[in-house]
Image: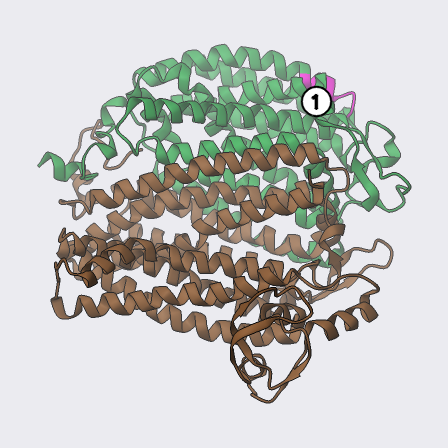
């Protein structure tokens, strides 16, 4: 069943979505850990060290999964998509190699120093290592998003007539085009929502249990505030991003709205019943003019519909079907926005509930609802970020590089279905097992709570002991 | 020197860096069941490489990424052609990486035993497969243009064989070489980084596996001369590698850990360099027709990309080497079983000093 192309697409989808569950959590949480440690450094308040240790451990459990699933990503381009790799290597390989040299080395080396360095490095230097790792993770995000942005909106290249391959001619354009910058800002703010909600929910969970309240109240607050600020950021960047997309990938935005016919003062449909794959959808809630406004900033502007764009693309690229699968784009776009904003609503709720030192331990329906919502809310921004990626990648179809290479032409030509079945099943099974293990470990270490006692300065303590056989402060 | 040559050298440097560094931590993983008789010893072993293994593995990612950027056709042909082998390699690296972080996270012997198996398999399989992969690059593999196309455009060149073509005698021998060399290299690293019982066991292992490695390496490197573009250079290099290896084992015997490690690192450096010297200007040999070889010219990116990447590499590589080197300095102290604190998951406090107060 299935062609090597279809199976490879499933494999790329599964492994990438899986990888990107750990990534946003890493991207945001490392800043929380670094901030807590910095607060400890400058205020000397023990709770910040406890929070550093507590969230540091959760961060590392998660980071390990991000690292190992990331290796698969780099290999897969060549393994399953060799025609893509041949076509784009000259352009796409550069940010990938830069990511390795500038980012991967930085984050992995300095995290090693941070994990094992508590008693080997003076306090200040040890603090610097977590910041170096944080910068590394962010650089990594930038380079890979610039590479992805080039697939969405290729710039700074020409096609070599002799080989038919893309050739880079402007690295600045590739690295700093507005699509790349906006994708980075949108992804980073989304990542802060993911980890903000996670930190806040963990903190709030301890408050509902009335455990280690002095430690976890600041965590809840910090997490909730970050979630709210990030929610504003993600909305602004999302709005700017969609305006860029209307210009660069109008088909994707038309498919996001299931807008089949070109319209002036186009409405934004909130919900639709029935089939969105037909020539026109049947919206049940619409806001007139809003789509025009969201697309261009003008309520009366014309928004191009799928049918006109299809005709224009046929004229430009030859006969073919240039329409992405509309039900996926339409619903993933709405779910991204809707589910994501649940986290912001919950964050407001949490801040209000615990305002000015309150810690209600009631058993009424509100308290019960909060108790149920709190662990679940962690999933909301994570799901939203997943829907965002499904939207942007599925919305680019049938292209792998917009306007230049079709996904169908990108697959490795001699790859057999048997080979892809083996790897698809293998990755999925191993990933599923690891997911169970990782979640179990995270829950275990959350329930364990923050350490009751912490050593203020392991480096000093270690220096006091002269014997050669002194115990290590930390060991695997 | 032209840019493609510089990039060929840089790719060689990245692979040498990878094999010298990750080589020893793969080796330590292979030795887990043999030297790690009890949990305490296994923890000593894991902790010698704990702070550095991830940074070492990045050399592989950068070698992959740099090949993609500088020689896209090499990357595309090799990665798609070696599909199942790389799939197995990836699974091995996945379970291995997670195992280091997770093995101490539950206080259960069965849990730790399972992760220790993952570390062993996750280290032995890559140590073997890297050799097999290199054997197929250097000894040649079935590469030809796709049906109905010609080799005039190198984009048409693909690996046309199957998984079992990769398991040819030369490649398998190369696999045995990398497996045994890395295991010995890992044992010597353990000698350098430990004291007491672990160090004694590592010394025995280094000598035993080292001798097997010597035989495998001599056989492989001699066979390699059959594919070499310039035997007059690569044969002497192979001899130098052999002499360095004998020196390394001699230093093991004399208990001079530092020298032994430098010499085994030197062996890997010279041996891998000799493979690349013999390969140039090709990057992948076709066992079907030399006209189908991928070369630094027909597989490379264009000048603009290579120039930019040269600047990035020339600036970043020394910086990376400096901070990675510093990491080794920070963690220079030897570890012994008496220094291992109680299992971190055993109590709420990972804080030993606090716990003992």
The image's colouring method is by chain
Q: Which segment did they paint magenta? A: B220-227
| Residue B309 locus on image (x, y percent) | 64, 54
- Determine the image quadrant of residue B48: top left
Chain letter for mark 1? B
Q: Answer yes or no: is residue B259 visible.
A: no
Under circle 1, the secondary element is helix
The reply to whether the magenta stretch includes residue B309 is: no
The residue under the point 23% across, 52% down is A51
**Colour in which chain A is shown?**
brown
- Determine the image quadrant of residue B347: top left
Side (left or right) of A370 relative to A390 = left
For label 1, the residue is: B236
| Residue A384 locus on image (x, y percent) | 45, 60
Above or below: residue A176 compared with residue B36: below
The secondary structure that dominates the magenta segment is helix
Q: Nearer the viewer, residue B208 or A414?
A: A414
The chain letter of the green chain reads: B
Above or below: residue A455 compared with residue A242: above
Q: Which of B162 and B28 is in front in this view?
A: B162
Q: How many marks?
A: 1
Q: Answer yes or no: is residue B321 visible.
A: yes
Q: Nearer the viewer, residue A437 or B195?
A: A437
The reply to whether the magenta stretch includes residue B226 is: yes
| Residue B284 locus on image (x, y percent) | 76, 34
- Determine the image quadrant of residue A194: bottom left
């Amino acid at each position: 069943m299935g062609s090597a192309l279809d199976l490879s697409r499933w494999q790329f989808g599964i492994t990438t979505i899986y990888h990107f569950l750990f990534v946003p959590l890493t991207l945001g949480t490392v800043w929380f850990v670094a901030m807590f440690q910095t607060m400890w450094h400058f205020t000397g308040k023990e709770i910040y060290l406890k929070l550093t240790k507590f969230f540091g451990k959760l961060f590392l459990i998660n980071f390990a999964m991000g690292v190992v699933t990331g290796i698969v990503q780099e290999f897969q381009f060549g393994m399953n998509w060799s025609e893509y790799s041949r076509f784009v290597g000259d352009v796409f390989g550069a940010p990938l190699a830069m990511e390795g040299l500038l980012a991967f080395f930085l984050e992995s080396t300095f995290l090693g120093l941070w994990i094992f360095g508590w008693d080997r490095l003076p306090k200040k230097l040890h603090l610097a290592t977590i910041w170096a790792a944080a910068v590394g993770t962010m650089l990594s995000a930038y380079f890979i998003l610039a590479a992805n942005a080039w697939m969405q909106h290729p710039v700074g290249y020409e096609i070599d007539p002799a080989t038919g391959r893309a050739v880079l001619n402007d690295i600045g354009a590739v690295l700093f085009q507005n699509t790349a910058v906006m994708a980075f800002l949108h992804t980073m703010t989304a990542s802060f929502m993911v980890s903000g909600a996670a930190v806040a929910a963990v903190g709030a969970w301890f408050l509902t249990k009335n455990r280690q309240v002095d430690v976890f109240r600041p965590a809840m607050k910090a997490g909730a505030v970050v979630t709210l600020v990030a929610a504003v950021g993600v909305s602004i960047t999302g709005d700017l991003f969609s305006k860029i997309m209307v210009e660069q990938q109008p088909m994707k935005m038309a498919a996001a709205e299931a807008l089949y016919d070109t319209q002036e003062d186009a409405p934004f449909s909130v919900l639709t019943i029935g089939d969105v794959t037909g020539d026109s959808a049947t919206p049940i809630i619409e806001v007139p003019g809003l789509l025009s406004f969201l697309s261009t900033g003008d309520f009366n502007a014309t928004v191009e519909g799928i049918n006109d764009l299809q005709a224009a693309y046929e004229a430009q690229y030859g006969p073919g079907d240039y329409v992405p699968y509309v039900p996926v784009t339409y619903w993933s776009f709405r779910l991204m926005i809707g589910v994501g904003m649940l986290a912001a609503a919950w964050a407001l709720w949490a801040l209000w509930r615990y305002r000015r030192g309150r810690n209600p331990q009631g058993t009424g329906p509100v308290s019960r609802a909060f108790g149920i919502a709190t662990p679940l809310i962690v999933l909301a921004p994570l799901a939203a970020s997943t829907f965002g990626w499904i939207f942007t990648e599925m919305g680019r179809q049938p292209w792998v590089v917009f306007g230049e290479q079709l996904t169908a032409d990108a697959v490795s030509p001699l790859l057999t279905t048997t080979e892809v079945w083996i790897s698809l099943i293998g990755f999925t099974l191993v990933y599923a097992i690891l997911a169970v293990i990782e979640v179990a470990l995270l829950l275990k270490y959350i329930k364990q709570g923050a350490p009751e006692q912490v050593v203020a300065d392991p480096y000093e303590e270690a220096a006091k002991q002269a014997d050669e056989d002194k115990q290590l402060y930390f060991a695997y | 020197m032209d840019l493609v040559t510089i990039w060929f050298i840089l790719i060689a440097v990245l692979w040498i860096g990878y094999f010298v560094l990750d080589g020893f931590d793969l080796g330590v993983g292979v030795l887990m069941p043999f030297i790690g008789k009890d949990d305490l010893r296994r923890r000593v072993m894991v902790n010698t490489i704990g702070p550095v293994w991830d940074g070492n593995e990045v050399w592989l990612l950068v070698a992959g990424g740099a090949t993609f950027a500088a020689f896209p056709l090499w990357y595309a042909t090799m990665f798609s052609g070696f599909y199942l082998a790389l799939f197995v390699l990836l699974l091995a690296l996945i379970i291995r990486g997670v195992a280091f972080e997770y093995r101490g996270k539950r206080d259960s012997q069965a849990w730790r035993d399972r992760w220790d198996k993952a570390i062993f398999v996750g280290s032995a399989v890559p140590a073997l497969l890297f050799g097999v992969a290199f054997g197929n690059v250097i000894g040649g593999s079935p590469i030809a243009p796709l049906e109905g196309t010609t080799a005039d455009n190198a984009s048409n060149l693909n690996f046309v064989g199957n998984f079992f073509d990769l398991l040819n005698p030369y490649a398998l021998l190369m696999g045995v070489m990398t497996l045994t060399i890395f295991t010995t290299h890992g044992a010597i690293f353990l000698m350098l980084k430990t004291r007491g019982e672990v160090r004694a066991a590592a010394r025995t292992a280094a000598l035993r596996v080292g001798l097997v490695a010597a035989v495998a390496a001599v056989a492989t490197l001699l066979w390699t001369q059959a594919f070499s573009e310039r035997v007059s250079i690569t044969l002497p290099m192979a001899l130098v590698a052999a002499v360095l290896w004998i020196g390394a084992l001699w230093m093991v015997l004399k208990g001079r850990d530092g020298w032994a490690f430098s010499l085994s690192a030197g062996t890997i450096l010279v041996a891998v360099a000799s493979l690349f010297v013999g390969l140039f200007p090709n990057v992948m040999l076709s066992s079907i027709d030399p006209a189908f070889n991928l070369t630094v010219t027909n597989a490379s990116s264009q000048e603009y990309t290579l120039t930019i990447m040269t600047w990035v590499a020339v600036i970043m590589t020394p910086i990376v080497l400096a901070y990675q080197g510093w990491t080794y300095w920070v963690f220079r102290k030897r570890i012994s079983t008496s220094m291992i604190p109680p299992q971190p998951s055993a109590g709420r406090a990972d804080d030993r000093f606090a716990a003992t107060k």
